[in-house]
Image: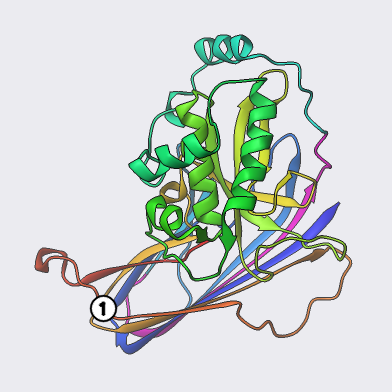
Amino acid sequence: MIYSVRHITTFLYEPAVRESVMELRLQPRSDVRQRCLKFHLDVDPGANIMEYRDFMGNIVHHFDIAESHNQIKLTSQALVEVDLEPAPGDEGTWNDLDALVEAEDHWEMLLPSQFAQSSDRLQGLASELNCVRRETPLRLLLELNQAIYRTFAYVPNSTKVDSLIDEALESRQGVCQDFAHIMIALARQLQIPCRYVSGYLYRAESATDRSVEGASHAWVEALVPGAGWVALDPTNNCLGEGRHIKVALGRDYADVPPTRGVYKGGAQSELSVAVLVSPANAPTPAEMAPSMIIRSRPQFRPPSKRGEQEQQQQQ
């Protein structure tokens, strides 16, 4: 299946800011199951865009706007071919997994990370879900995928971009970013390498997805013996089905935000995001309404940083 992805991010500042520096992870990856056929990025005001790959091979675009401005509009458009992911076999045992981990280098996806680490509440959930090594790695992962879906309500804006998993664990609600972090933390405790995936989800007419249409998405990939990296989506209780479009991989969200940057000035900011994922042959509307609008007040760093403010968007 070939998909068209259009992602528009707009930052508004009042009053105008003096300078902005930003990096973006918006270009879909190319791997054995997915190929990014075309990608175009437009930045307004115009800027010199540089490109590099980070430690996970994600494509990162970086730019600096060194003049006064009260708006940044980012428009990315991609054409991506995604193969239907075959159902993983369930032949690998825990001994097979241990041998695979010992033979390969996956330590970064086994250790706690900024947003995926243990806590008393996580241990309580692990006990509640009987999260111990049993049956096979794949069967347990599928059970956890379903359990997170059933245990937590999907509530947009119930957490923030920098929320730790304890917030979702306490309220039993969150968004895809939270559910991915919870599953990663549970899997790593069992010595299953697990990584965070940012990207998009195509919503077919027959699908019953909980995640919001018109926004980016997040899920996980876990290493399963005999099957490799298997995509699991605890937000929607499904596997990778050929509808998940992968953009970036990381230890958790901290490695792969769609946008990350700082600006100079005491402005109040507003962030709006609009995403459209459709079959490549479907018409693209002239205008796209934002699915998310976030307003924030200045939160300055120490004076030595000249009043720089971080700005990111949640998944």
Question: Of all residues shown, which one is farthest toward the left?
Answer: 303
Left or right: residue 106 compared with residue 138? left
**64 or 17: which is nearer to us?**
17
As drawn, 294 above or below 4 = below
Range of magenta residues: 65-86
Here the colouring is: rainbow
As drawn, 257 above or below 293 = above
Numbered label tally? 1
Judging by the rendered image, the residue that carries numbered circle 1 is: 298
Left or right: residue 39 compared with residue 14? right
Relative image position of residue 4 (x, y in whole percent): 77, 63
Left or right: residue 311 compared with residue 38? left
Q: What secondary structure is the magenta-colored segment mainly?
A: strand
Give the crowd class for mark 1: few <14, some 14-19, many >=20 residues within 10 Å.
some
State which quadrant residue 83 falls in: top right
Residue drawn at x 76%, y 38% is: 33
User: What amino acid type is highlighted by mark number 1?
Assistant: Pro
**272 or 232: which is nearer to us?**
232
Question: Of all residues shown, which one is farthest toward the front?
Answer: 128
Relative image position of residue 183 (x, y in whole percent): 53, 41
